[in-house]
Amino acid sequence: DEIMRQRAAGRAILLISVQLDELAALADRILVMFNGRIMGEVAGDEADEERIGMMMAGVAVPEFAAETAS
């Protein structure tokens, strides 16, 4: 898979998806956006479908609040 080859080569990849299992398998970190705002950030290996789903719906999840959220 090309994405995995690029990741292994240390390249940054911007992947936009609603498929949490795909994101968790490919991403080192996941930033969740809602209405153009970053709702939170979570490590790919710590991805939790319920909490990520809440952030996707615009609900603030304090333990995943991104420092860059605005």
Image: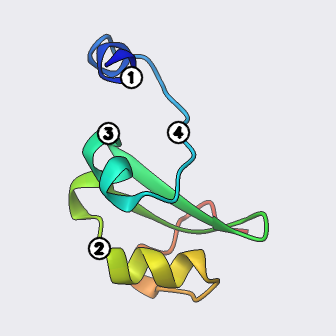
Numbered circle sitting on residue 26: 3
Q: Earlier in the sequence, mark 4 or mark 3?
A: 4
Mark 2 to mark 3 CA distance (whole Å)? 15 Å
Label 4 close to label 3 by CB (< 8 Å): yes
Q: Amino acid at mark 2?
A: Asp
Identify the residue at horizontal 36%, vertical 83% (top origin). 50
Mark 2 lies on residue = 48
Identify the residue at horizontal 44%, vertical 54% (top origin). 30
Q: Position of residue 16 (x, y in %)?
A: 57, 46
Label 3 close to label 1 by CB (< 8 Å): yes
Mark 4 to mark 3 CA distance (whole Å)? 9 Å
Mark 4 lies on residue = 15
Label 1 close to label 2 by CB (< 8 Å): no
Identify the residue at horizontal 78%, vertical 71% (top origin). 35
Identify the residue at horizontal 52%, vertical 57% (top origin). 31
At label 1, counting other C-alpha atoms closer than 10 Å, the crowd grade (few under 14, some 14-19, many 20 or more) is few
Check the image and report above or below for 52 versus 60: above
At label 4, counting other C-alpha atoms closer than 10 Å, the crowd grade (few under 14, some 14-19, many 20 or more) is few
Label 1 close to label 4 by CB (< 8 Å): yes
Mark 2 to mark 4 CA distance (whole Å)? 18 Å
Colouring mode (rainbow / by chain / secondary structure / one colour): rainbow
Mark 1 lies on residue = 3
Q: Amino acid at mark 3?
A: Leu
| Image quarter of the N terminus | top left
Q: Earlier in the sequence, mark 2 or mark 3?
A: 3
Kindly indicate the quadrant of the structure image that contains residue 39. Answer: bottom right
Q: Secondary structure at mark 4?
A: loop
Q: Amino acid at mark 4?
A: Leu
